Amino acid sequence: MKLIYSASAGSVENATGSWVITAAPPLGFAFDGIFYSDNIAALKYIGAGRSQLTATEISSVVEWLSGQVMPAIPTPTLADLIAQAVIVQITIINAACQAALLAITQEYPALEVSTWDQQLAEAQAYTINNAVATPLLSAIAQANGNTVTALASSVLTLSAQYKAASGAAIGRRQLRTAQIYAAAAATGATVAQIQAIIW
């Protein structure tokens, strides 16, 4: 039989019905939970067909619940705390890296960014042979009043800047991640040492 008691809601429920407890639990009795009992069959039928329990019935329910042995919550070990700190700190580092990478491209529409590879390929090809077809660069140059030559040069410059900035962010993330793992594996490692590794 499943018996549910909620100190905050003040109700008892089992397979036969739900009732309202009008009396307050004993002092210090303030926990919520799900309890199982197969040896107190009487509780299966207490309050059947009624909306309230009597004071005696309330007392018997509270007495039974108070006598239950609650499962112990295991105390986390230092290894558990360190493992959790590693997960949290790497999540923080990853979020910082993501923000840094997004900052590089935030002034450009996402669909324009998706054309950067093609723009770069055309710019590189044009630099080698200015007779090569450059459909995307030519369309952009015509629309913004620029020349393909000037646009190709600008694309190459911006591409180099983007690679440098994104590479720095990615490299920094990899360094911080390696530092976190190293700190966790070190003899005498502490949670504080891991939390001290920031972006």
Image (cartoon, rainbow, N blue to C red):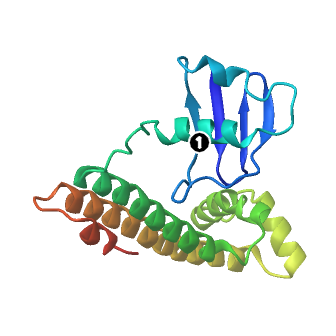
Name which residue lies at 78% across and 69% down.
109
Horizontal side, residue 149 vs residue 67: left or right: right
Determine which quarter of the picture holds residue 51.
top right
Determine which quarter of the picture holds residue 59.
top right
Report the label total: 1
Q: Of 118 and 176, which appears nearest the observer?
A: 176
Amino acid under label 1?
Val
Q: In the picture, which quadrant includes the C terminus?
A: bottom left
Determine which quarter of the picture holds residue 54.
top right
Horizontal side, residue 11 vs residue 182: left or right: right
Residue 20: x %, y % from top left:
79, 44
**Vertical arrangement, residue 21 with respect to residue 139, above or below:** above
Horizontal side, residue 65 vs residue 190: left or right: right
Q: Which residue is mark 1?
A: 62
Residue 106: x %, y % from top left:
69, 75
- SS of the residue at dot 1? helix
Q: Of 93 and 52, which appears nearest the observer?
A: 52
Question: Which residue lies most toward the front here?
Answer: 56
**Vertical arrangement, residue 29 with respect to residue 40, above or below:** below
Name which residue lies at 65% across and 25% down.
43
Q: Of 104 and 87, which appears nearest the observer?
A: 87
Residue 36: x %, y % from top left:
56, 26
**Vertical arrangement, residue 182 with respect to residue 46, above or below:** below
Q: In the picture, which quadrant includes the N terminus?
A: top right
